[in-house]
């Protein structure tokens, strides 16, 4: 398979492996466009020497803080500075999470929140982490639980409700800094999250907030309710519940926007909560360590070089994440060959037009031609994406850890790549 062989060459001779038995491939890549021999990305004769020289002149004084890789659609590594060095990626980590989710779940997947009535009459509220579930949705669930609004099977008497939620120890990755957990961007990751568990800042106890608001809504409608928190569902219980679904009545269901819109929320607007939920749903694991391990295996199965890769969360807020610019550039190239390539690219910010890049490169030749993902945490600045040039796409990844004035350097690199496409014979 072209994608697998092509991207493996970028890893040189060493690729990290995960313990345990090998997993099956999760998808069949599209057919290669031709039968031409595959280029060796590490073969110096295939790099763009003028581009490499320009990158060296720009980055050499501060190279220890940077990793930069530029790849074309043929798989040629046109320019590279410390590209094999794994660094903290910040929100460029979302490029991994969203690619994993799109591949595993498809562009039409929707997160579901349901109120069900079991065969024994018990009502249960369960969800999948819809980031857009709000107060209006909760009000509709309260109506259904009380037998209002045409809900079938519900009783107009006192409501006994079980709420299926994750235990507190699963609400945040344990390596997120405690200070981050107070802000909206560090809100707890739960299955039933009203307004993404953020209200100005982070909601510290989303279960209690949901319980309080549900009780108020039922009382406002003249009823009463007892709310209990159910134990988390194990994988075995999930399988059993799926098999017993015919014995349940769905009283009301709220669905999220489709996957392609969720991807845009995660990548264009860099929404941490959405990225974390997508990682967990793609892995079918709400334990972030297990979900991260699944994403790591998926990267390997795509033939993407994973030397030094460490997946610690889905959003990039964890400082335990590690990824190289070569890995990100290879992922971008792999996803551009994917059957859902258009959805993936469309989820990114656009230079001078949309998302976290809306205020950058306005009026420059790059405006509207770079689709990318930004990343920023203290001491870290990253940006990776697809630059459209007259010579076709360039898959560019730039990660800085500890660099001064990183934004200026990023802009210079993108202009250099754009201006040296196609690769000139000399400069």
Image (spheres, rainbow, N blue to C red):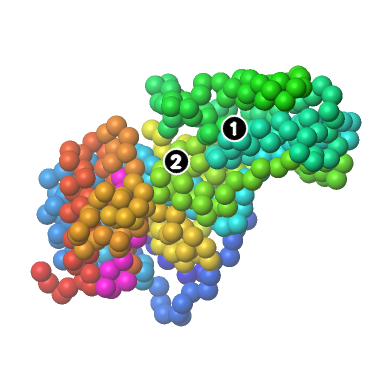
Side (left or right) of 44 relative to 165: left
Q: Quadrant of residue 54?
A: bottom left
Give the residue at x 67% y 25%. 217
Instruction: Give the x, y percent position of residue 182.
Output: 43, 22
Instruction: Give the x, y percent position of residue 10.
Output: 37, 59
**Does residue 176 appear anywhere in the picture?**
no
Residue 383 drawn in magenta = yes
The secondary structure that dominates the magenta segment is: strand
Give the residue at x 12% y 45%. 61
Side (left or right) of 43 relative to 160: left
Q: Earlier in the sequence, mark 1 or mark 2?
A: 1
The extreme bottom residue here reads 35
Q: Give the spatial CA distance, label 1 vs label 2.
A: 20 Å
Residue 216 drawn in magenta = no
| Mark 1–mark 2 CB contact (< 8 Å) | no
Instruction: Give the x, y percent position of residue 192.
Output: 62, 32
Frontmost of labels 1 and 2 is: 1
Label 1 SS: helix
Label 2 SS: loop
Give the residue at x 76% y 25%. 161
Density class for disc 2 (Cα within 10 Å; few <14, some 14-19, many ≥20) is: many
Give the residue at x 28% y 55%. 352
Which residues lie in the magenta part? 382-392
The residue labelled by disc 1 is 135
The image quadrant where one finds the C terminus is bottom left
Name the one closer to the observer, 123 or 341: 123
Density class for disc 1 (Cα within 10 Å; few <14, some 14-19, many ≥20) is: some
The residue labelled by disc 2 is 271
Q: How many labels does the image show?
A: 2
Instruction: Give the x, y percent position of residue 252.
Output: 74, 40
**Does residue 146 appear anywhere in the picture?**
yes
């Amino acid at each position: 398979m072209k994608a697998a062989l092509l991207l493996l060459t970028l890893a040189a001779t060493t690729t990290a492996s995960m313990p345990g038995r090998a997993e099956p491939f999760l998808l069949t890549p599209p057919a290669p466009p031709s039968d031409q021999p595959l280029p060796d990305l590490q073969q110096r004769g295939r790099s763009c020497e003028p581009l490499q020289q320009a990158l060296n002149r720009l980055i050499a004084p501060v190279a220890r803080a940077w990793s930069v890789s530029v790849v074309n659609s043929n798989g040629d590594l046109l320019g590279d500075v410390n590209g094999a060095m794994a660094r903290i990626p910040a929100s460029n980590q979302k490029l991994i999470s969203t690619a994993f989710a799109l591949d595993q779940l498809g562009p039409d997947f929707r997160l579901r929140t349901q109120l069900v009535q079991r065969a024994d009459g018990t009502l249960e509220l369960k969800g999948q982490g819809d980031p857009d579930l709000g107060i209006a949705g909760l009000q509709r669930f309260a109506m259904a639980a009380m037998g209002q609004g045409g809900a079938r099977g519900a009783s107009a008497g006192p409501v006994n409700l079980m709420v299926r939620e994750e235990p507190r120890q699963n609400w945040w990755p344990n390596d997120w800094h405690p200070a981050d957990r107070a802000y909206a961007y560090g809100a707890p990751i739960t299955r039933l999250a009203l307004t993404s568990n953020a209200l100005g800042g982070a909601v510290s106890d989303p279960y209690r907030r949901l319980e309080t608001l549900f009780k108020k809504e039922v009382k406002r409608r003249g009823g009463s309710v007892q709310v209990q928190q159910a134990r988390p569902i194990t994988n075995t219980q999930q399988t059993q519940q799926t098999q017993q679904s015919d014995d349940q009545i769905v009283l009301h269901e709220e669905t999220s926007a489709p996957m392609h819109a969720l991807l845009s929320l995660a990548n264009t607007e860099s929404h941490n909560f959405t990225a974390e939920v997508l990682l967990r749903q793609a892995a079918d694991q709400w334990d972030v360590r297990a979900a991260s391990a699944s994403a790591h295996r998926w990267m390997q199965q795509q033939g993407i070089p994973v030397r030094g890769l460490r997946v610690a969360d889905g959003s990039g807020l964890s400082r335990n994440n590690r990824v190289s610019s070569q890995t990100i550039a290879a992922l971008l190239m792999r996803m551009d060959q994917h059957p859902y390539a258009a959805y993936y690219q469309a989820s990114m910010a656009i230079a001078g037009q949309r998302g976290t890049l809306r205020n950058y490169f306005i009026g420059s030749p790059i405006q509207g031609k770079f689709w990318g993902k930004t990343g920023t945490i203290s001491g870290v600045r990253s940006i990776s994406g697809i630059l459209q040039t007259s010579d076709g796409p360039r898959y560019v990844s730039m990660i800085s850890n500890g660099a001064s004035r990183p934004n200026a350097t990023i802009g210079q690199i993108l202009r250099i790549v754009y201006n040296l496409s196609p690769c000139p014979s000399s400069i």
